Amino acid sequence: MDKNRKYPLQLPVFVFSLAGAAFLSVVDLTIKWAVETIIMDTPHRIHLLPFFDLVLVFNRGVSFGLLDDLGRWGPIVLSGLAIGIVGVLIIWLWRAQRMNEIIGITLIIGGAIGNLIDRLYDDAVTDFLNLYVGQYHWPVFNSADVFITIGALCLLLPDLGKRTDVARKNSS
């Protein structure tokens, strides 16, 4: 292998990133469990701020409730799609060289796996964060969605990791 080749990602960084994604998935699932079984044991709305409530919603579709009418095949199709996307992201992570890519992909994988496990367990994703201004509401979302959104922002901000290659430098 050419010593000047900048990828694949060093194995320790790759493994650390995958462990980080697994940790984020556990955090997401723990938060969803706490919201569903402790905080919202009797589903209701908890008003926290003038623009933020906790509510309990089970989303059988994807973002914004899209594709929620796929019937009994919905969870299978959406889970298969998520598995495929996570696979592509793992390959991208293996080849990633910039810190913004590594952080972004790790966050997206963690969120996607959290939502995937939730969907496989409940045939739906548990959403509970409700942002609004007056009568205008953003669709209810969850902690995995926050991880995915921040991860996507990391990928869109390439200067965050400018000139920060994690590939082994040739010290000659």
Image (cartoon, rainbow, N blue to C red):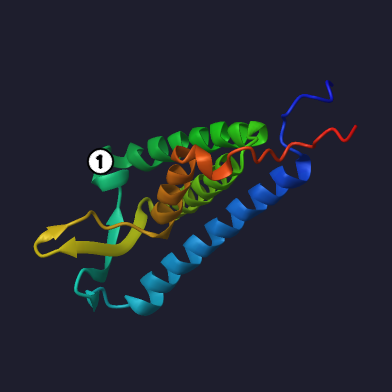
Can see residue 87?
Answer: yes
- Relative to residue 62, is residue 11 drawn left or right? right
- Relative to residue 155, is residue 20 drawn left or right? right
Can see residue 61?
Answer: no
Residue occupying the point 53% across, 38% down: 86
Q: Is residue 12 above or below residue 118?
A: above
Residue 77, image quadrant: top left
Amino acid tagged 1: Leu
Residue occupying the point 33% across, 59% down: 127
Residue occupying the point 26% across, 58% down: 140
Q: Quadrant of the C terminus?
A: top right
Residue occupying the point 53% across, 56% down: 25
Where in the figure is residue 128, as x and y percent of width and height? 31, 64
Q: Of residues 82 and 41, which is closer to you in this image?
A: 82
- Relative to residue 172, is residue 7 drawn left or right? left
Where in the figure is residue 130, as x and y percent of width and height? 25, 63
| Residue found at the very far top of the displayed protein | 2
Q: Of residues 9 and 127, which is closer to you in this image?
A: 9
The residue tagged 1 is: 66
Where in the figure is residue 74, as x and y percent of width and height? 33, 39
Where in the figure is residue 163, as x and y percent of width and height? 63, 37
Q: Quadrant of the N terminus?
A: top right
| Residue found at the very far right of the displayed protein | 172
Residue 10, image quadrant: top right
- Badge 1 marks a residue whose secondary structure is loop
Q: Is residue 138 above or below residue 98?
A: below
Q: Of residues 77 and 151, which is closer to you in this image?
A: 151
- Relative to residue 124, is residue 84 drawn left or right? right
